[in-house]
Image (cartoon, rainbow, N blue to C red):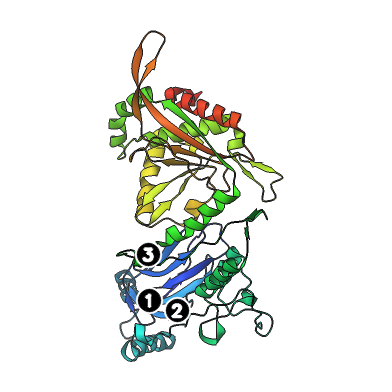
């Protein structure tokens, strides 16, 4: 016997609402347990809503472009489980009639399955692109509201585009993302100069679109959703934050010996002890010693919010791009605890299973390229944080101890910081203190 299950939006973190960017199923479609039904997108990540049981989609309550929040019912599923069947067989007579409400829902699903085929690409109406002039005046729809979805409205707000001046190309004059892009592109081409978010002018010539195929064979590959999202944030952070990068080296010879000596203990707990947990603990100690690094600048730039917690973001390289999940309360966890959590969150990141709440609340970020190589780089600050640590590959170096040169394992450090909050002398002291913590990890316990 089937039962009707309400599919609801799970915990999405502190977001008031997230956009629906894909509906992966149709009414009447048979789905398996854990099969993805919808794709949601926040400012920092995408997440998929899976089916809680196998069954048939009876009703869809959302569409692409809608904004949903935690607890919203987005679909109804006619599910059938062995556990439910067994329970009902024990407690109900075999000839009990099917409820009329459920019977009508089943009949509707069957009718849809047999009579309503899925639309083909050719049947879906395609909007005709329209280039809207940035200087032309258009008549706003009745009531002074532009005809656009919440996702398009948010996209327009991020770009600073006035939707009342954008001409919609979709059916009934509905405005699409492409219309907004065309409007902004036209505006940039017409304007003699652009401005930053702070109103500072940047007299830069607009980029010219080039047909690269004129020079030889080319191939076009679309960016992943993560790359598209992170690209705009990185550009904003680089322009709006005065970056300075302090370079230093940490002697991790003793730390590496201690790490390797405890690898067997880590294996007994089913994990691997990498250098990253040591770096996290050393960074927490440095953040406690230099509180301005564990802070955020208010939007108006007049106040500094000093944080009393220690949540560290870790940059994870995935096939779809770089993501930065946050490990919480790192000051309260041991090295092996951090190692286990790192392994778990990194795997979820590569599988695309991170939730929006996994990216929130970071105080300080570590971006480690040690497993790849390099000697130094300038990481971009992950606003609203005020500093980020870049780590490159360790190398052997002869150091003079007052009597002789001895080979030591050195770790390159690259600390980018917000110069509005942190001055150069403080940054140099921070990296020196951090290097001392790594040189003798026992000091972290003091």
Mark 2 nearby-residue class (10 Å; few <14, some 14–19, many ≥20): some
Of circles 2 and 3, the one toward us is 3
Q: Which residue is mark 3?
A: 212
Residue 242 to residue 130: above or below: above
- Tag 3's secondary structure? helix
Cβ atoms at labels 2 and 1 below 8 Å apart: yes
Residue at 43% from the left image edge and 67% from the top image edge: 39
Nearer to us in this view, 395 or 46? 395
Is disc 2 placed on a helix, strand or loop? Answer: strand
**Residue 149 left/right relative to 377:** right
Q: Is residue 176 visible?
A: yes
**In terms of depth relative to the viewer, which is nearer, 405 or 186?**
186
Residue 71 at x, y = what percent? 52, 67
The residue under label 2 is 60
Task: Please give the name of the residue rendered at 67% of the width and 85% of the height, measured from the top-left corner.
Answer: 142
**Disc 2 to disc 3, C-alpha distance:** 44 Å
Picture coordinates of residue 399 (x, y %)? 38, 17
Front in this rendered view, residue 167 or 144: 167
Residue 48 % position (x, y): 41, 65
Choose the circle earlier in sequence order: 3 or 1: 1
Secondary structure of residue under mark 1: loop
Of labels 2 and 1, earlier in sequence is 1
Give the mark count.
3
Measured in 3D between alpha carbons, the distance from the residue under mark 3 to the one under mark 1, in whole angstroms, is 38 Å
For residue 435, the mark is none
Cβ–Cβ under 8 Å for marks 3 and 1: no
Please state, as top left, top right, bottom left or bottom right, where the N terminus lies in the image.
bottom left
Provide the residue designation for mark 1: 25
């Amino acid at each position: 016997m089937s039962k009707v299950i309400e599919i609801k939006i799970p915990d999405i973190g502190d977001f008031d609402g997230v956009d629906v960017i894909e509906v992966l199923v149709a009414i009447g479609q048979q789905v398996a347990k854990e099969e993805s039904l919808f794709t949601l997108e926040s400012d920092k990540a995408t997440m998929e809503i899976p089916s809680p049981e196998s069954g048939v989609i009876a009703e869809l309550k959302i569409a692409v472009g809608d904004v949903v929040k935690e607890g919203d019912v987005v679909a109804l599923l006619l599910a059938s489980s062995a556990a439910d069947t067994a329970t009902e067989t024990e407690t109900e007579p075999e000839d009990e009639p099917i409820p009329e409400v459920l019977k009508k829902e089943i009949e509707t699903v069957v009718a849809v399955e047999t009579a309503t085929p899925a639309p083909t690409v050719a049947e879906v109406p395609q909007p005709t692109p329209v280039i809207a002039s940035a200087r032309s005046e258009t008549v706003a729809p009745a009531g002074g509201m532009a005809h656009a979805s919440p996702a398009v409205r948010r996209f327009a707000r991020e770009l600073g585009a006035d939707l009342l001046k954008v001409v919609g190309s979709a059916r009934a004059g509905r405005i699409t993302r492409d219309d907004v892009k065309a409007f902004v592109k036209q505006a940039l081409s017409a304007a003699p100069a652009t401005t930053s978010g702070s109103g500072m002018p940047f007299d830069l010539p607009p980029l010219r679109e080039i047909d690269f195929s004129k020079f030889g064979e080319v191939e076009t590959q679309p960016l992943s959703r993560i790359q598209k999202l992170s690209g705009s944030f990185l550009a904003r952070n680089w322009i709006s934050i005065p970056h300075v990068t302090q370079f230093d080296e940490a002697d991790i010879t003793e730390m590496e010996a201690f790490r390797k000596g405890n690898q067997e203990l880590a294996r007994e707990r089913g994990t691997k002890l990498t250098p990253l947990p040591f770096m996290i603990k050393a960074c927490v100690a440095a953040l406690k010693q230099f509180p301005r690094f564990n802070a955020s600048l208010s939007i108006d730039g007049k106040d500094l919010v000093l944080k009393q917690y220690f949540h560290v973001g870790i940059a994870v390289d995935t096939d779809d791009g770089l993501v930065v999940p946050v490990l919480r309360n790192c000051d309260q966890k041991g090295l092996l605890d951090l190692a286990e959590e790192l392994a778990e969150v990194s795997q979820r990141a590569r599988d695309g299973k991170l939730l929006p709440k996994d990216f929130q609340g970071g105080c300080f970020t570590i971006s480690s390229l040690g497993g790849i190589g390099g000697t130094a780089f300038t990481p971009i600050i992950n606003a609203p944080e005020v500093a980020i640590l870049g780590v490159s590959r360790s190398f052997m170096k002869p150091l003079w101890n007052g009597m002789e040169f001895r080979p030591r394992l050195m770790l390159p450090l690259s600390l980018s910081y917000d110069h509005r909050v942190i001055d150069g002398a403080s940054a140099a002291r921070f990296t020196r203190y951090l290097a001392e913590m790594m040189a003798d990890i026992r000091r972290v316990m003091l």
